[in-house]
Structures are given as C-alpha cells and as structure tokens.
Image (cartoon, grey):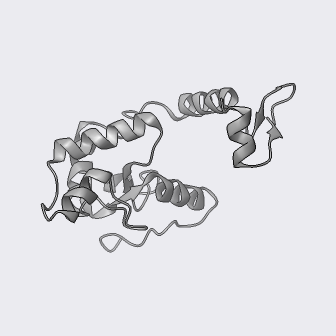
Amino acid sequence: MISRATAAHAGVLHPCPFPRCPELTIRGPCESHRRERQREHDERRGTATERGYDRDHRRLRVLCFERDSWQCVDCNWEPEIVKVFREVGLGNPPTDRVLAELRDSFNRGDRHLHADHEIPIAQRPDLRLALDNMRTRCDACHRSKTIRESRGGTGRAGQIGGA
C-alpha cells in the first residue's frame, strides 16, 4: 500500500474502484485488490508449463536474449549489468549474472525482459519453439503488445517463415 504522503506528492488521490474499499490510490485499485485481481487472472491462465513455457522454452529464451544482445527490440532498454559492461568495453556479461539480475528485477516488480512470441502460441502452436518467432521485449513493451493483440490488433507480428 502506498502512504498518503507519497501518493499526495505523486498526484491526486482517488478511491479504490472496488465497492466499500476505504483505500485511496493514485490510480486504479488499491494494492490488495490489485493482488487479488492478479491472483484470479493467474488461476484462469494456468501455470507457465501449462501455457507452453517448459524447459525447452526456458533454454530457447536465453538464446533469444543473447541473439538480441539483451536489449528490448522495441525501446532498446537493457538490464543495468549489460549497460555497465558495454560502457566499459567488456561486451556482454556472463549469462548467469544477467539472468540473476533479471530474476531479481522481476521479483521486485521492476523492469525486466521477456522472450516474446512475435506470433502468439495460440495462433501458431507450431512456432512455440521457433527462435525466429521470438523477440526480446522489456515488460512494458511486452505488455503493450499483448494489449494490442487482445484488442484485435496484430501487435507487431509479421509473417514468420512465410506462414
């Protein structure tokens, strides 16, 4: 939950949109209702493995990150460790160190990377493990693409492999 002093400094406070919730937020639901909504959404989606993100996918995502030099293909955001290594001329840092930073960032709710399917698995399950169908995106760009797709847009998905 955000403190009133922090929220007041950041902007105007609004009531949580859930009926009878006394919490004030900068926008949207309070933290408790946001977590509840996310938990319900996650239960409907199923586990990562049930959605096709198994051991083979986890190996492929690392190849995707390395191919794209650990940068978001849309906005060029990169993890701090990658930026520091490049600035001092060391190339890319060890993969295990970048993955550890990304895991920590994800756990804190900070910006991180996704290996996104350019053409969603639901549309082309045969491309689930095709590296040519994967792009590195930061969580903000990944979320934007997913929203565009859910509204009937194509994200930025092009035709992969002449499909």
Give me the residue at 34% from left, 69% from top. Answer: 160
x then y, percent, for residue 5: 72, 36
Q: Nearer the viewer, residue 148 or 27?
A: 27
x then y, percent, for residue 15: 83, 36
Figure quadrant of the C terminus: bottom left
Residue at the outermost right position: 20
In this picture, is 20 found above or below 95?
Answer: above
Q: Is residue 27 visible?
A: no
Give me the residue at 27% from left, 64% from top. Answer: 132
Q: Is residue 105 visible?
A: yes
Left or right of 141: which side holds 17?
Answer: right
Left or right of 154: which side holds 108?
Answer: left
Give me the residue at 44% from left, 56% from top. Answer: 120
Figure quadrant of the N terminus: top right
Q: Nearer the viewer, residue 66 or 80?
A: 80
The quadrant where residue 41 appears: top right
